[in-house]
Image (cartoon, grey):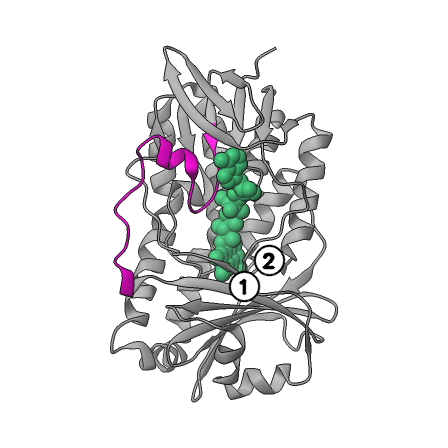
Amino acid sequence: MSPQLVVVGGGPIGLACAIEARMNGLEVTLIEPRAGPIDKACGEGLMPGSLAALHRIGVDPPGRRLDGIAYLDRDARVEHFFADRPGRGVRRTVLHQALAERAEELGAERIPAKVAGISQSGDAVELSLSSGGTLLAPWVIAADGLHSPVRRMLGLDGRPQSGTRRRFGLRKHFAVEPWSSLVEVHWSHGAEAYVTPVAERLVGVAVLGGRPLDVDEVVAGIPELAARLEGAAAVTEPRGAGPLLQRARSRSSGRVLLAGDASGYVDALTGEGMRVGFAQARAAIAAVRAGSTEQYERAWRITTRDFRLLTSALVLASRSRFRPRIVPTAARRPDLFGSIVERLSS
Ligand SMILES: Cc1cc2nc3c(=O)[nH]c(=O)nc-3n(C[C@H](O)[C@H](O)[C@H](O)COP(=O)(O)OP(=O)(O)OC[C@H]3O[C@@H](n4cnc5c(N)ncnc54)[C@H](O)[C@@H]3O)c2cc1C
């Protein structure tokens, strides 16, 4: 029997789509080539809104409590403690496992393959699979990541960013007892280091910036962080992602909707990818049920507005002459810093 919905990509957002679909009684098939639990370059900070979205779909991955965000540079520090509820630092593999188990428990079918082609006629979308064969469905959600092959196949790739302005992310884990319940964002000369406690004796460091980018070099340039990590063994290999800015010309084409990073991404600087992606997963399933791609476009714009505007503004400031004044200004205006963090994280 053909499914009512196919989800392409079994990362966190694809899995959330599959879970939402089953919670709404839809027959769903998920296509993902990689066996889990899947790791990825990520800061691994689930902001309060992300955690609440996971709880809503019955997923509660273990991790380390996050009470807020701190911005630091050589001269200044500003902290904001989340107003209503904590977030959680969760190792990416742990999050993936929890989502995959929930999807399976709810009866989402999974095909281990890559989508290699897509075409539409009338009310049907046809997917060709790398494993051979095709799959037909009335609706497809593509949650196949930053460099979404489905987005490209549908001609929905937006304008690429120019070479010198491109930003990348790299992350690595260190065996050291977390020293704070805050996500620390250390601003150094040309890069940011985003530090998240994720488990007992485990801290993730994600560095963001232009190329060349190297975790150890960025850490060495931040004396306070270098001191914290001195002697701590690196327990994962660096994993990278980027260019981070990815634009989509539209979030839908016919009966195919784009969700998660595939639908467009700004930057990892504000740690909002998953909160926004989980909101998109919910909106995409509501749109499939309503049979309305316009409904999804509207919901997508609303759910991503703050992320697009505030994160773009911060990235722009980070590349301007204002960069050295970002942390001192935030430290002078903790109320403003706090209200921006709240808008982005809850
Ligand atoms: C350095 C860095 C730090 C970050 N820090 C944070 C943070 O602290 N908090 C936060 O919330 N977000 C953070 N993010 C963002 C977050 O990681 C992403 O928003 C999130 O991973 C998006 O999930 P996704 O499911 O859309 O995509 P992905 O996790 O990339 O999953 C896409 C899946 O699609 C599959 N796929 C690809 N092609 C095909 C195909 N042809 N057929 C079938 N399947 C396919 C892939 O195998 C993959 O499993 C960070 C990102 C970076 C780069």
Q: Which quadrant of the figure has residue 130?
A: top right
Q: Amino acid at mark 1?
A: Phe
Q: Quadrant of the N terminus?
A: top right
Circles 1, 2 touching at the beta carbon (< 8 Å): yes
Question: In the rendered image of this protein, does residue 291 appear above or below residue 314?
Answer: above
Left or right: where 146 falls relative to 99: left
* Residue in the image at 47% along x and 44% along y: 145
What residue range appears in magenta? Answer: 141-164
Question: Picture coordinates of residue 342 (x, y %)?
Answer: 46, 60
* Residue in the image at 24% along x and 78% along y: 321
* Residue in the image at 35% along x and 22% along y: 254
Q: Nearer the viewer, residue 2 or 224?
A: 2
For the question of whether residue 13 can be seen, the reply is no
Q: Which quadrant of the figure has residue 296?
A: top left
Q: Amino acid at mark 2?
A: Arg
Q: Which residue is mark 2?
A: 85
Q: Nearer the viewer, residue 25 or 4?
A: 4
Q: Which residue is mark 1?
A: 82
Q: Main secondary structure of the magenta part?
A: loop
Q: Nearer the viewer, residue 10 or 212?
A: 212
Question: Picture coordinates of residue 337 (x, y %)?
Answer: 40, 70
* Residue in the image at 69% along x and 25% along y: 107
Give the alpha-carbon distance from disc 1 to disc 2, as whole Å: 6 Å
Q: The residue tagged with tag 2: helix, strand or loop?
A: loop
Q: Is residue 25 magenta?
A: no
Q: The residue tagged with tag 1: helix, strand or loop?
A: loop
Question: Picture coordinates of residue 67 (x, y %)?
Answer: 60, 66
Q: Residues within 10 Å of mark 2 (few under 14, many from 20)?
A: some
